Amino acid sequence: MNRKRSFVSLLLASSFVVLAVSGILAFLLPFSIQIVGLHALMGFLFVAVIVFHIANNYGHLSRYSRSRILVATLGITLVSTLLFFWQPEPVKKVLGLSRNLGPAQDRFEMVEEGLVYRYSPAPHYKMALTVRAGKSFASEAPPHVAIWLENASFYHIKTLRAPENEGEGRAALPYWDFKLRGWEKAREEAEEAGKSLQEKMEEADLDAVSGATQNSSFDPADYILPADPDNPMPYRLVLEIDSPDDDLPSLVYAVEVDNADPRAFQLLELVGYPAREEEDEEGKETWALYYVDYSDEKFAPVLELVDSALLQIDRETRGE
Amino acid sequence: MNPQEEATDRRKFLQTGLAGTAGIGLAAASTTSVAIADEEKASISPEETNEVDVLVVGGGTAGHVAAIQAARAGAKTLLVERNSQLGGTTTTGGVAFPGLFDAWGRQVIAGIGWELVKESVELDGGTLPDFAKVPQRHWQNQVYTNQFLYAILAEEKCAEAGVQIAFYEFPQAIKKTDEGWEVDCVGFGTNRRVRCKQVIDCTGGAEVVGMAGFSRLREEERQPGSYLFMMGKEHQPGRNQIHRLYVHGADSTNSRTATQANLTGRKTILAKVRKEKKRLMHLQPETGFRESYRIEGETLITVNDYTSGRLFEDAISYAFYPVDLHTKTGVKPKPLKRGVVPTIPLGALIPKDSRDIIVAGRCLSSDRLANSGLRVQASCMGMGQAAGVAAALAAKAGSTPMEVPLAEIHALLKEHGQIIPGQA
């Protein structure tokens, strides 16, 4: 009997440790199916072991349930459940510390017609990007693809889809790689300086002529699921694509998404091809996009990689 | 040496000596070269009368281009400017980075404005933006020019084209005549009566149009002006931008409102110098104004026309810039959608029910939001050239700009290097 009780208690304790650590990691880190999966499945095991634990300790529990403490514990549980479910502003602020943008679900499929990327950061916000294959799109040697979001100041805020092979992908998609590295570096520097990324970037960015372009937030949730629906911030969804077996440049397509002017579907437009600039006096690496010269035949195969890229956003109107 | 030669030499000596004496302080700090103003052309009599084909009022961003174009088209042209140099916002205002001449990877505004900008950059050893590059922000394709050089080059182009320039003058009265207009201008020590066939109003706020009694539009609140200066570090003309501060309520309507804007701007800069304890390295002589009056024209350009890139039937120039309305809290430029290039119709330059008068520049007939994108330099240069062509052709034909066949305007604009909307 004692051995059985010990087994159940120790299993409960060890599974709880995994559950707690994976829960904290799921909160702190960007969405990861490994961590969330570990947490969820370990949770099922924990629940199963709990059944035995309750059976082993039924006598004690039965005594507890007859005391006044039961009312207090049920009260606390009920209040916590309501608070965490309805999420008033202070709770939202705590959740805002998470780098896991809610129960994000993304799915990337290479299909014969091209590729489909689905992203649903919230039940009422479903995004689908459908890239229809052009003549030179070979599904047996699929292109490198990166999809990311930029804020109004053209800063990377979130990579939605990194290429399958990150090493090769970074080389094949230099514009995404450049943007991502800039964002990673800025984030590290901001952390070292004890500032938010937004503060750090605003310091570095001296705008000109027409005054400041909105530098805005670096939190993707502020764009996709703005806390203040009356002040939504436009953002850009950018796609870089490159055919693996040629020396031609990659192409960058983009579309601006403005939740203040919601559209169910929008076509991405070709912005240009990336080219590295000469390093400036400080030796800072910069990449720029160049207009594609349609009359230049060298661009013909790469232009035929994509027939069209359609972004669909399904925003369910929530009842007030 | 004969007596005549001796007299000439003596005169030269006196001129050089007098100029040298007067300029001792300057010469020590700058140069040993001494320039002598042409005495024959500078009359000391206060009364002056001119009969010209085209009178251009305002030598700013649109005005000097309009004058050069009218003169190049064969019209006898007089250019009246209230300040001491040409170029307006580009030079006196210090916004020496005109734009935008390109849109979506191709040039959309060329002609005389571009000729001047390009030449000034070349002469200054500067560089043009790489127009093949997709600009992340609209101002990246504005062209850094040396404002001082630009002003002198504009004068040279005027002289070569045969434009007569009258600085420090402004119209005080305008009267319609059978042949066109009689305009009385006043400057210090000068009362000038101008009889002309056509007037091109490039005053920014359509001041001549207002004086002639045509209807104008005005908002209750204007966009702030910008006072440009450089503090703490060296000003490199033609290489970068300088500091600027908003002057709220800045209004270029008359000398009193302009004075107020300048006093406010400079007072604020002085306070900034005291507070930040940095050296003031450069200061423009005047506020750059964004908004005052607009004309009520034969055609009104709406923001929908502008943002949709409507190709007007009587389009005479392209324009390209985001919708860019500055307010007390700053500005959030709204870029145009990919591929959109707005156009400017001739009718937006013609005051409603008028004859023999045309405008160019930020006072064109447009709603406020459209105007916030149309008001910029390259677009004003494009309008200036079109107005110069229309006025010169009207003066030649004895008609009015709105009656000049559009094909003739397009042909002459093309001949002078401008890009015609819908034909590029």
Image (spheres, rainbow, N blue to C red):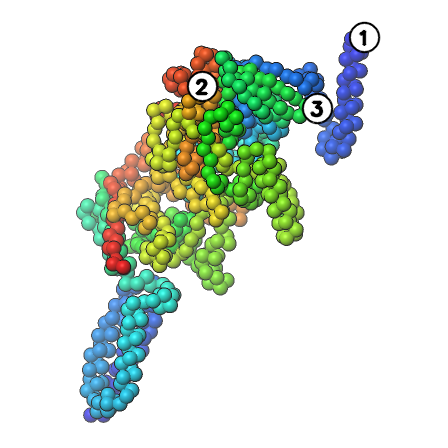
Q: Nearer the viewer, residue A164 or B368?
A: B368
- For label 1, the residue is B3
Choose mark 2 or mark 1, whichever is in front.
2
- For label 3, the residue is B35
Query: Residue at image x 53%, y 19%?
Result: B175
**What is the distance, in whole Å, between disc 2 and disc 1 at their CAs?**
56 Å
Check disc 3 and give the amino acid type. Ala
Q: Secondary structure at mark 1?
A: helix
Using the image, tell me which numbered label, if any, was put on residue B209.
none
- The subunit carrying tag 3 is B
| Relative horizontal placement of residue B79, taking residue A63 as reference (left or right) | right
- The subunit carrying tag 1 is B
- Sequence-first disc among 2 and 1: 1
Marks 3 & 2, CB-CB < 8 Å contact:
no
**What is the distance, in whole Å, between disc 3 and disc 2 at their CAs?**
43 Å
Q: Nearer the viewer, residue B301 or B217?
A: B217
Query: Residue at image x 57%, y 13%?
Result: B51
Query: Residue at image x 65%, y 22%?
Result: B190
**What is the distance, in whole Å, between disc 1 and disc 3 at their CAs?**
25 Å
- For label 2, the residue is B355
Provide residue B296's location: percent of width, then percent of height. 43, 29
| Relative horizontal placement of residue B260, taking residue B176 as reference (left or right) | right
Provide residue A78's location: percent of width, then percent of height. 27, 76
